[in-house]
Amino acid sequence: MGETLPARAPTLPKVAIVNETLVKQFFGGRNPIGRRVTGTGETYEIVGVVKNSRSRTLGENPRPILYRALAQDIGRDPDFRGFSLVVQTRGNPAAMETAVHNEIHTLDPTMAIFNAETMEEHLRDARVLPRLASTLFGIFGITGLILTAVGLYGIMSYSVSRRTREIGIRLALGAQIGAVQRLFVRQGLMLTLVAIALGLPCALALAKFATSILYGIHPHDPVTFTAVPFFLATVALLACWIPARRIARVNPQKALRYE
């Protein structure tokens, strides 16, 4: 399939190149060469297909794109934002810039040239907002995880401490210290597992909203969705086991008098 538009006069039938998304959406993935499509009030014959590309933002989803021949459409449909000229070189891009400027001014001395930059510079500028967003998301995520861990530990520890009298009664009736500890740890972990089971689907659903903001990061990262629940479960385990262990070592009579 072709990848470059031939130079054709404006009076000849108009031709265009389409991307893979347009072929899939309008032709069901079948060979579109020679078929015609209508866009911007004109009918174009498809002469080639190119791979999908991003033209607006780095995180955008693939969308149908029709590439028209500049010689056939520049006079009828000018773009007030100008046109982008991409030049590929194996040498130093800075040395090529002067030659490109001279060639353009040879064709049209009045042509304005602006925003000349290398592809590395263009990508660096395009990644500014995604990097800022990822940094902010990372800071907020770590802060939220720390606050969640502190709050979880405090709540679980407080709930165990409130059952000091119950622990004293169990020990006075002959219960083993290890059995009491395992009981409270098991009950605490059950609540944690229920919370994780309810929270994971919500987190997976909300992660889809970050797809268009964070470039190069999969919204459903298996490491993150495994490590965070495991970390919170470990915090809950310690929050139940440490207070229960401390209270179980207290004299049962003191535990029974606890208010």
Image: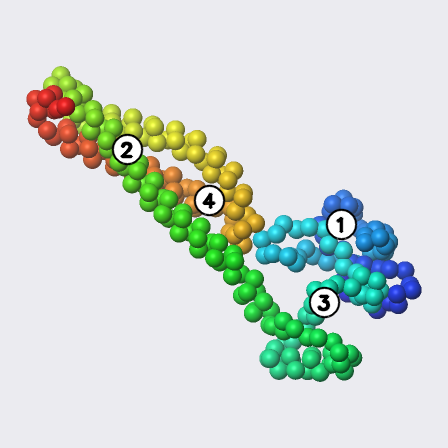
Label 3 with label 1: CB-CB less than 8 Å: no
Q: Establish if 149 lies above or below 240.
A: below
Please tell me whether mark 3 sits on a helix, a strand or a loop.
loop
Residue 173, numbered label: none
Q: Nearer the viewer, residue 61 or 225?
A: 61
N-terminal label among 4 and 2: 2
Front: mark 4 or 2: 2
Q: Nearer the viewer, residue 87 or 210?
A: 210
Please tell me whether mark 4 sits on a helix, a strand or a loop.
helix
* In the image, farthest residue toward the right: 11
N-terminal label among 4 and 1: 1
Measured Cα–Cα span from mark 2 to mark 3: 61 Å
The C terminus: image quadrant: top left
The N terminus: image quadrant: bottom right
Residue, disc 3: 83
Please tell me whether mark 2 sits on a helix, a strand or a loop.
helix
Measured Cα–Cα span from mark 4 to mark 3: 42 Å
Residue, disc 2: 155
Residue, disc 4: 222
Residue 23, numbered label: 1
Front: mark 3 or 1: 3
- Which quarter of the figure has residue 208? top right
Question: What amino acid is labelled 2 in the image?
Answer: Ile
Question: What amino acid is labelled 4 in the image?
Answer: Pro
Q: Establish if 128 lies above or below 259.
A: below
